[in-house]
Amino acid sequence: MFFDWLKLLVCSFVTLLGVVSTAAQESNEDRLRQFQFQATVLEKSDWIHWGDQKGTYSNWTSHSNRLIPVYSYGLSLESVQGANSCYRDESRLKEIYQTEPIDTLNPNAEYFDQTDIYRLQKSAWKSGKRNIILMVFDGMDWNTTQAASIYKNGKVLYTEGRGSGLAFLDYRKGNSEFGFCVTSPHNGKTKRDVNAQAVTQVTDHVGGGYNAVFGGATPWSKSVDSTYLLGKRKDLPHPYTDSASSAASLTTGVKTYNGSINFSVDGQKLETLAHEMQRSGSSIGVVTSVPICHATPACVYSHNVGRSDYQDISRDLLGLPSASHRVDPLPGVDVLIGCGWGEYRDDERADQGDNYVPGNRYIARDDIKRVDVANGGKYVVAQRQSGKSGLQVLRQGVDRAIAGGNRFFGFFGATRGHLPFRTADGNYDPTMGEAKVDVYRPADIFENPKLSEMTTAALDLLSKNEKGFYLMVEAGDVDWANHNNNIDDSIGAVLSGDAAFEAITQWVEANSSWEETALIVTADHGHLMYLDDPRVLMGERLPLNSVDFVKAIESNRIKASEETRLKEEGSKPVQ
């Protein structure tokens, strides 16, 4: 009996090794895809977990209140961190939070506030920098960055501080500095009416703040209470931010409510740095790997009481009348390159108001026609085209815009309106997470440019203005991957964004200088992923108990037909 059991155990272990080995033979780095799939199926993991329950693969798929890294190039962080931190000054905290935040004052704080990033950008511009670039890795906290570094380099290069092993970590020109900030919003609840563009503050709202004792004094600190970072601690329920509120902090310097696109808690439109620079003659550019009107790109320029009023947000970006600017529309940005192509909905009036136009949920078809130079508009429009290289379509459109002195709108995307998700090994073959699996056809890869290519295109266009520019670049797929608790996609997204960062620095070195250009790289918020054993990312050991995984296969929790079905779905034409 004992020997029969032992034989079964050995056979099971060999079976798992065979699964891993086969994947490794196909791609030397594809082991992570297998481990991601395994952890999701078993719903437990001994090497990584998301949330506040170690051992359970996931019990949390949203944001957290973690401190967020900030990397600067061409400007200093000295004026806002350490001894100059607003978290050491009660009066400044009251000004930032518009009230006195509970249990937030910290005389030893090294961190600063997310709104300080706006002030740093503005100060750099006022002091003579012609070009201001903000790069946002949406949803990328320190832990996500470290995981990407470990995977890419095959070893743990750091356990605290700035770190190394990625381009934005290693690049030190421009007197690069490192710090970290608090992302907590003003509050998490405000009622809003997108038709009237009005907000009503909830009387019993929970105010923002940050407590380093519970949350950690640094991004790499072990939090005393993970439930605090999730806003679950009843005696101190500091809310975590969403992407809209945090992006507004970055672009306006004002803390507001979750869901706000540059509206204050009392319903007033907030001016962004892009608005101010545009009035002075600078060009404005927005680049994103996700839909053009999602929260982060939207907050560079648009106004809306609700982040889901996508079509109106796009109208602001392109200088058309919108729900928030009905009579006197905004001038519009000069360069807009992003996604949302191919996503259609019959009715989204509940989120987008009574003026929603059935069709593409992110931008109305007639609005694209109105802005096109072919119809008398201001923008050369380049959209994803069947059978044509995305990079070629992008570059041809850029060349036309430069030759004609026009603005430029590049509109691309694949499943769910974003660029195809790159996985850690450089392929585009995501596996299971907590949400739907994206499956791409070869055309989805071929017909879309990469984020790095979109970034270079924007810089080529914006640099034609001798008065300089403001550019925001968003690697938005990091957030989508982390919401999905998918470490394979998450690392792939970080590496994709890292390539876009390299495109920026290469452009600065070839066409500008750090004397006239300032760059800040940061995130809008974090999630709550813990890497419990980095050896799995390094390929030094197998995760979990192999027998558990084989039992899952034998009990039909994993079906061979699932991958076939997903591939068949992926082969269907885009509607």
Image (cartoon, rainbow, N blue to C red):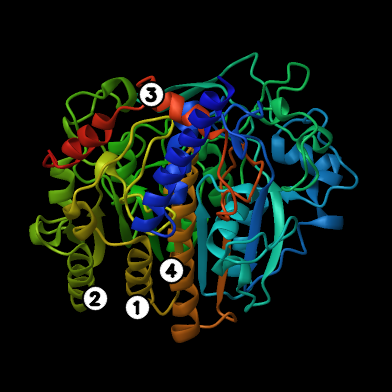
* Residue located at (34% from left, 75% from top): 460
- Judged from this view, the residue extending furthest toward the bottom is 510
| Residue that mark 3 sits on | 554
Asked if labels 1 and 2 touch by Cβ distance under 8 angstroms, the answer is: yes
Q: Is residue 146 above or below residue 208?
A: below
Amino acid at dot 1: Lys
Q: Which label sits in the foreground, 4 or 1?
A: 1
Amino acid at dot 3: Glu
Q: Secondary structure at mark 4?
A: loop
Q: Is residue 156 above or below residue 350?
A: below
Which badge, 3 or 4, comes first in the chain's sequence?
Answer: 4
Q: CA distance from mark 4 to mark 1?
A: 10 Å
Which badge, 2 or 1, comes first in the chain's sequence?
Answer: 2
Q: Nearer the viewer, residue 476 or 116?
A: 476
Q: Which mark is residue 324?
A: none
Q: CA distance from mark 3 to mark 4?
A: 63 Å
Q: Secondary structure at mark 1?
A: loop
The answer to whether residue 328 is visible is: no
The image quadrant that residue 196 belongs to is top left
Q: Which mark is residue 282?
A: 4
Which badge, 2 or 4, comes first in the chain's sequence?
Answer: 4
Which badge, 3 or 2, comes first in the chain's sequence?
Answer: 2
Amino acid at dot 2: Ile
Residue 423 drawn at (x, y percent): 40, 52
Q: Which label sits in the foreground, 2 or 4?
A: 2
Amino acid at dot 4: Ser
Badge 3: how crowded within 10 Å, few (<14), some, or many (20+)?
few
